[in-house]
Image (tube, rainbow, N blue to C red):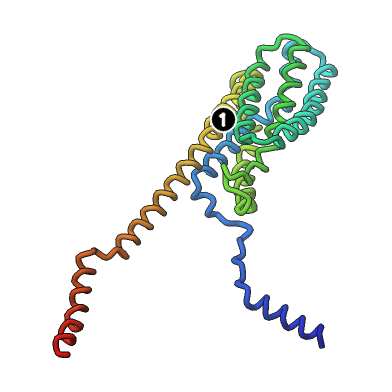
């Protein structure tokens, strides 16, 4: 009997609690957020800078007279340094207080510089240094750009599930179109370095959009705050009763009392 009573009490408690509104897994309302639009454009242009070294580092090294066997070491160095880049940026972002989006912006700028440096290398060790530095920065950016969607500077943890789907879809456009466009550019210019320059330009544009994410978020929050304050002021004006009306009402209420006292 006690167990039955406990079950009934639990059912009544669950029925009395208001049901929480379920958040849809795919919500395109994030596209109304200016900060998310800037962040999505950052991902769109940044992805253009991810593919160039892995595809064109061997043709670039061969154009400098480096053997193909030695060129393969650059890809290995790039992959190994990418692992350390992911671990290192993870250790940095766990420290407080750090504005994570600024750390990502610094890594994107350094990644852009490394792409510009590739065509200026003239020997094996120069390309090796550029590959190692690029892999480190690539790991830092690639390991943080999706988790940062959960930060309040972008969309927040509540809308992250929807934001990730939309963001990856937008990012995949440049991931699909970037390598063919780079190949067309190399064939047109007959210069492998042009692919690195184009990817660096894409990363530079992405850095601009990334720098605009937080100002857009602060501006949107400020507008929402001003709108809420305006609504509160309008409600207060509606509810406000002038003192003149109060005095007139009090006088009307005093008249019957005085007449009754005179009659008595």
Q: How many marks?
A: 1
Q: Quadrant of residue 179?
A: top right
Farthest residue toward the bottom?
A: 264
Q: Residue at x 57, y 56 (%)?
A: 27
Residue 187 appearing in the image: no
Closer to us: 213 or 223 = 223
Q: Quadrant of residue 189?
A: top right
Q: Residue at x 81, y 83 (%)?
A: 3
Q: Is residue 250 above or below residue 43?
A: below
Q: Quadrant of residue 96?
A: top right
Picture quarter with the N terminus:
bottom right
Q: Position of residue 262 (x, y in %)?
A: 14, 86
Farthest residue toward the front?
A: 264
Q: Position of residue 102 (x, y in %)?
A: 60, 32
Check disc 1 and report the residue beneath it: 207
- 37 to the left or right of 236: right
Residue 82 appearing in the image: yes
Closer to us: 260 or 100 = 260
Q: Residue at x 68, y 80 (%)?
A: 12
Disc 1 crowd rating (10 Å Cα; few below 14, some 14-19, many 20+) is many
Q: Secondary structure at mark 1?
A: helix
Picture quarter with the C terminus:
bottom left
Q: Position of residue 223 (x, y in %)?
A: 42, 47
Q: Residue at x 82, y 14 (%)?
A: 67
Closer to us: 220 or 54 = 220
Q: Is residue 207 above or below residue 224?
A: above
């Amino acid at each position: 009997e006690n167990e039955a009573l406990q079950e009934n009490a639990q059912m009544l408690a669950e029925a009395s609690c208001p049901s929480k509104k379920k958040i849809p897994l795919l919500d395109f309302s994030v596209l109304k957020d200016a900060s998310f639009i800037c962040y999505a454009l950052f991902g769109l242009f940044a992805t253009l800078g991810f593919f160039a070294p892995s595809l064109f580092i061997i043709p670039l090294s061969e154009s400098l007279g480096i053997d193909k066997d030695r060129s393969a070491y650059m890809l290995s160095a790039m992959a190994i340094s990418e692992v350390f880049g992911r671990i290192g940026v993870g250790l940095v972002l766990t420290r407080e207080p750090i504005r994570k989006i600024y750390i990502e912006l610094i890594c994107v700028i350094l990644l852009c510089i490394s792409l510009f440096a590739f065509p200026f290398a003239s020997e094996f060790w120069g390309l090796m240094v550029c590959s190692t530095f690029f892999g480190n920065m690539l790991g830092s950016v690639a390991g943080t750009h999706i988790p940062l969607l959960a930060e309040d500077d972008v969309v927040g943890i509540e809308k992250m599930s929807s934001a990730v789907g939309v963001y990856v879809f937008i990012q995949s456009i440049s991931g699909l179109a970037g390598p063919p466009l780079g190949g067309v550019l190399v064939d047109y210019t007959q210069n492998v370095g042009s692919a690195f320059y184009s990817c660096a330009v894409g990363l530079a544009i992405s850095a601009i959009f990334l720098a605009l994410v937080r100002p857009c978020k602060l501006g949107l929050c400020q507008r929402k705050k001003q709108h809420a304050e305006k609504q509160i002021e309008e409600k207060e004006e509606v509810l406000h009763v002038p003192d003149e009306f109060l005095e007139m009402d009090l006088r009307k209420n005093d008249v019957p009392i005085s007449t009754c006292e005179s009659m008595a």
